[in-house]
Image (cartoon, coloured by chain):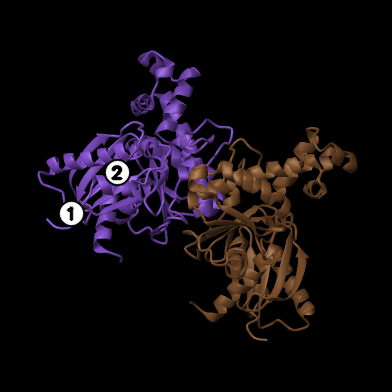
Chain colours: A purple, B brown
Amino acid sequence: MTGLTVGVDVGGSKVLAVLADAEGAVHAEARHATPPHEDAPGVVVADTVAGAIDDLSREAGRALDGLPVGVGLPGMLDRDGVLAVSPNLPSASGADMAAVLAARLGGRAVVLANDADAAAVAEHRLGAARGVDEFVLVTLGTGIGGGLVVDGRLLRGAHGYAGEIGHVVVDPSGPRCPCGRRGCWERYASGAGVARLAREAAVSGRLASLVAEVGDPEAVRGEDVTHAAAAGDREALAVLDEVGWWLALGLANLAAILDPGLFVLGGGLVEVSTLLLPPTRRHLAGHLEGGERRGVVDVVAAELGTRAGAIGASLLAADAERGPA
Amino acid sequence: MTGLTVGVDVGGSKVLAVLADAEGAVHAEARHATPPHEDAPGVVVADTVAGAIDDLSREAGRALDGLPVGVGLPGMLDRDGVLAVSPNLPSASGADMAAVLAARLGGRAVVLANDADAAAVAEHRLGAARGVDEFVLVTLGTGIGGGLVVDGRLLRGAHGYAGEIGHVVVDPSGPRCPCGRRGCWERYASGAGVARLAREAAVSGRLASLVAEVGDPEAVRGEDVTHAAAAGDREALAVLDEVGWWLALGLANLAAILDPGLFVLGGGLVEVSTLLLPPTRRHLAGHLEGGERRGVVDVVAAELGTRAGAIGASLLAADAERGPA
């Protein structure tokens, strides 16, 4: 088999590695938990990436030593491979990840990308945005990431930091964000947002049957609410409706600025997309400036699911191997 | 003189027409008030554009009949020249402005553009953003408009609606916006925003000396505050500091999404840029995700001032005359 590359997606809570070919077909995959905070920025993350690649090698039943590796990282990755700021991966925030990963994975070609940018590349070539040259990939994981595709190409920005859409402030007196500010969009519409709104609902006396089951309103988690909603619990569905309202608010903000033809939702929360998409679409129609006159912008689930980032990273590694187009 | 074109900038409160050459040098200019609401969308606006061009002809001392005309319009102008939605130019909202203007200015080449896009073109070629290929032009007029330049080119979006940055919601429980929603950025940081924050300050008992002068706190206008601030009134300066805080909040939101290398502030409020830029820059450093690690994004005043939109419209008319690059 030729043209194989390794793609690794480093998220706030887990690391996914895939072995993929140039068409994005996945031949093997491996998962690791993301390590906690550490003293030497990036080193434990690099160890975990290396560990995931070792597991991938066992899974694939072959050595992967010579293969190019693409790595998707959450946060503000500059064009030189420095992860300037990463609220959801504090253990690598500030690290020169290009240098740290090159040292740890020595002897291979290593390509770095923002995780959502990698996912956008995968969805554009192989997934929900095939043939769409103006779209936004929104990753709903621990936080919210964004891959912006304009005129068929990734919008990178002056430094490489474009697409930090989770940190658009939608209420300056809102809850604190790990980034240090208040009321960032991802406080309302990411996995962390679902958890926060679920706990608020439980503590304020809603979600009665769920609280009776869990025992303590403070202990209600986002997953409890999505499970209850999937089972038809009306109060749990109301919480997801609230999440959809906030999700749509942020999408409307992006539409005001970028006017994309499509929104693609990826990341961990996409697993509950059958619950989240209907309220999000309904609220988006109300949030969009111009309303009916501008027409709606469609919102769809990422087709490559939670593997989009890792597959995109492998595609970017293959691109780099081929050289400039 | 060859290569002359007419550029017209239609704002929420006034229309400016210029006669300019291909280098953007202005040979004559004329101003008109923007007409109020009307029944046939766009017709009175077209009449006003025609009237401004007649005045321009008298001012220039020559007929302008054959010259191409570029017209900048505020709001969501689609790629076919339909002004789908224009909260700050309600009399033309929904009008097929390409058709209405072609009928009214018959026999000329007419090129339409979003007003802030036109201003961005002018500042990029001739003004504050020369040599900068990643920047955002922010027009602070009645509302807030945006011209987004990415990789040296205007970001237009899927339909032509990109850059509606004034309608990014920064507080969903904030004041009503003419667009129908609540808490749009332009409610805080445009001319209308200054007026609102000034009135709020006056009514809440601040701005004592200014209120004593004006007589009625409800009658305090934005201009009163900027004049008082220019004269050193501390409470008026505090209101502009508040405006700068909100302006910086919205710029930080744009930086999170687009990562521009520069912000250029244009529009009517740029006339008070010596008062507004220092607080805006100071607050932006605090609002930017990543803070010191990402470095600051500079904020400068548009060099072509309030004529940027009209000059840009004339440049776009000249581009169209020359044909595709």
Would you name the residue on which mark 1 appears?
A4
The amino acid pointed to by label 2 is: Asp
- In the foreground, A260 or B280: B280
Residue B124: x and y in percent read 57, 66
At label 2, counting other C-alpha atoms closer than 10 Å, the crowd grade (few under 14, some 14-19, many 20 or more) is many
- The N terminus of chain A, quarter of image: bottom left
Disc 1 to disc 2, C-alpha distance: 16 Å
Determine if residue B19 is in view.
yes
- In the foreground, B319 or A106: A106
Secondary structure found at label 1: loop
- The C terminus of chain A, quarter of image: bottom left
Q: Chain of mark 1?
A: A
Residue B318: x and y in percent read 59, 77
Would you name the residue on which mark 2 appears?
A9
The amino acid pointed to by label 1 is: Leu
Image quadrant in which you'd find residue A36: top left
Indicate whether B210 appears above or below A161: above
Image quadrant in which you'd find residue B181: top right
Left or right of residue A115: residue B81: right
Left or right of residue B188: residue B164: left
Determine if residue A302 is in view.
no
Q: Chain of mark 2?
A: A
Residue A208: x and y in percent read 43, 16
At a point 28% along the width and 46% down the height, the residue shown is A101
